[in-house]
Image: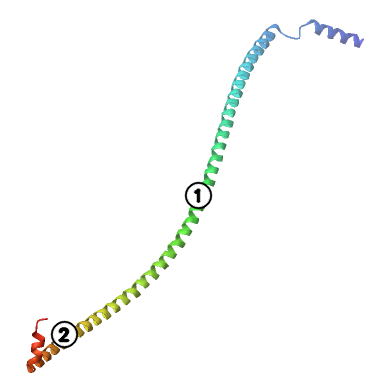
């Protein structure tokens, strides 16, 4: 019987509603507000996600652009490095050429100094020889004058020679 009494209690409990109509309406209202809030939050999250996709796409494009610029700058850097290497080679060649020209210039300067010394020596010799020539000319003129004087003396001493010298030819 005990079991039957309990059964009655169970039945009794079932006859009474386990919920209150007012509580049900409040729960329904809360569920509607919660659903609305969840929908709004879902919309916000979708908008945020969409914005993140857009931002991500922009960043991907910017990364691609920057990668291309980086590649271009690397290429330019390599080209500049090659140019600098070539300039370095050219500079070394110019330094070597300059060194050779300095050596040639020194050799030329020494040659000029030697030739200048030779010229001065030759000019001294020319002056000495010119003086000798002048002296010899003077001596020659003196000799010629003496000979003429001697001839005149001889002509004056011998009258027949005078006639020969003064006769028309």
Q: Would you say 132 lies left or right of 74 here? A: left
Residue 110 location in percent, x, y? Answer: 37, 72
Q: CA distance from mark 1 to mark 2?
A: 81 Å
Residue 23 location in percent, x, y? Answer: 68, 10
Q: Nearer the viewer, mark 1 or mark 2?
A: 2
The colour scheme of the drawn protein is: rainbow
Quadrant occupied by the N terminus: top right
The numbered dot on residue 53 is none
Q: Would you say 84 lies left or right of 18 here? A: left
Residue 86 location in percent, x, y? Answer: 50, 52
The numbered dot on residue 83 is 1
Q: Would you say 41 lies left or right of 96 here? A: right
For marks 1 and 2 on the same chain, the one whose residue lies earlier in the sequence: 1
Which quarter of the picture shows residue 129?
bottom left
Closer to us: 141 or 32: 141
Q: Count the labels in the image.
A: 2
Residue pictured at 50% horizontal, 47% vertical:
80
SS of the residue under disc 1: helix
Q: Residues within 10 Å of mark 1 (few under 14, many from 20)?
A: few
Residue 156 location in percent, x, y? Answer: 7, 92
Q: Residues within 10 Å of mark 2 (few under 14, many from 20)?
A: few
The correct choice, above or below, for 94 with respect to 28 in the image is: below
The numbered dot on residue 141 is 2
Closer to us: 33 or 71: 71
The correct choice, above or below, for 41 with respect to 137 in the image is: above
Which quarter of the picture shows residue 104?
bottom left
Closer to us: 37 or 5: 37
* CB contact under 8 Å: marks 1 and 2: no
Closer to us: 72 or 143: 143
Residue pictured at 8% horizontal, 94% vertical:
158
Q: Would you say 102 lies left or right of 140 here? A: right
């Amino acid at each position: 019987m005990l079991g039957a009494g309990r059964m009655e209690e169970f039945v009794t409990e079932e006859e009474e509603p386990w919920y209150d109509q007012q509580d049900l309406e409040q729960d329904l209202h809360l569920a509607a507000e919660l659903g609305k809030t969840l929908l709004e939050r879902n919309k916000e999250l979708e908008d945020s996600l969409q914005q993140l996709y857009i931002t991500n796409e922009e960043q991907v494009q910017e990364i691609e652009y920057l990668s291309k610029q980086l590649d271009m700058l690397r290429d330019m850097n390599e080209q500049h490095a090659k140019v600098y290497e070539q300039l370095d080679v050219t500079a070394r060649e110019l330094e070597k050429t300059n060194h050779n020209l300095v050596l040639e210039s020194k050799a030329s300067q020494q040659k000029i100094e030697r030739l200048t010394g030779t010229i001065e020596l030759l000019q001294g010799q020319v002056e000495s020889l010119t003086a000798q020539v002048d002296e010899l000319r003077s001596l020659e003129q003196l000799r010629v004058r003496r000979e003429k004087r001697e001839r005149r003396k001889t002509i004056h001493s011998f009258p027949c020679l005078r006639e020969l010298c003064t006769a028309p030819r």
